[in-house]
């Protein structure tokens, strides 16, 4: 069973930065598409950024130019560097791993709160 452990969330001021990390267990990390999603209070979960096994990235329009997703296959870890934070970035952030062997897996989430 895949386990995804997020860390790095917390409280930041508007304009500040946070870096989220997600450590994955198992042996399929390198072949997996990894993603960060978020869910604000009262809203649906939305995709923030994804990175393919080959390193191709996608971003939600709302975070383009501010957030950067990256991965370290040697450490089975995916990162989300968040700069120029805004109050609307406040949400629970979830790590996602997808591959054809184990399917979709989710972390427990980490809270990010941005104060204005």
Image: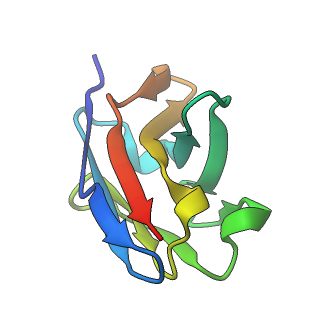
Is 64 displayed left or right of 95 in the figure? right
Residue placed furthest toward the front: 116
* Residue sitting nearer the eye, 13 or 92: 13
Is 29 displayed left or right of 100 in the figure? left
Name the colour scheme.
rainbow
Residue placed furthest toward the top: 1
* Residue sitting nearer the eye, 49 or 82: 82
* Residue sitting nearer the eye, 101 or 41: 41
Vertical side of 44 occupied by 72: above or below = below
Q: For the image shown, how many numbered marks are present on the structure?
A: 0
Vertical side of 108 occupied by 5: above or below = below
Is 105 displayed left or right of 103 in the figure? left
Q: Residue 12 at x, y = what percent?
A: 33, 69
Q: Which residue is drawn at 40% across and 50% down?
A: 30
Vertical side of 44 occupied by 18: above or below = below
Q: Residue 50 at x, y = what percent?
A: 60, 54
Q: Which residue is drawn at 55% across and 43% down?
A: 37
**Location of the N terminus (image quadrant):** top left
Q: Residue 11's quadrant in the figure? A: bottom left
- Residue 62, can we see it? yes
- Residue 51, can we see it? no
Q: Residue 48 at x, y = what percent?
A: 62, 53
Q: Which residue is drawn at 53% across and 33% down?
A: 98
Q: Residue 59's quadrant in the figure? A: bottom right
Q: Residue 17 at x, y = what percent?
A: 38, 78
Vertical side of 72 occupied by 44: above or below = above
* Residue sitting nearer the eye, 66 or 88: 88
């Amino acid at each position: 069973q895949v386990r995804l452990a997020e860390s790095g969330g917390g409280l930041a001021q508007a304009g500040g930065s946070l870096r989220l990390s997600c450590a994955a267990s198992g042996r399929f990390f390198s072949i997996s598409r990894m993603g960060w999603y978020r869910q604000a209070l009262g809203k649906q979960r939305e995709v923030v950024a994804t990175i393919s096994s080959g390193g191709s990235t996608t971003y939600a329009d709302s975070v383009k130019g501010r957030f950067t997703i990256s991965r370290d296959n040697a450490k089975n870890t995916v990162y989300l560097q968040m700069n120029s934070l805004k109050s609307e970035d406040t949400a629970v952030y979830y790590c996602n791993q997808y591959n054809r062997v184990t399917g979709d897996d989710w972390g427990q989430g980490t809270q990010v709160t941005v104060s204005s």
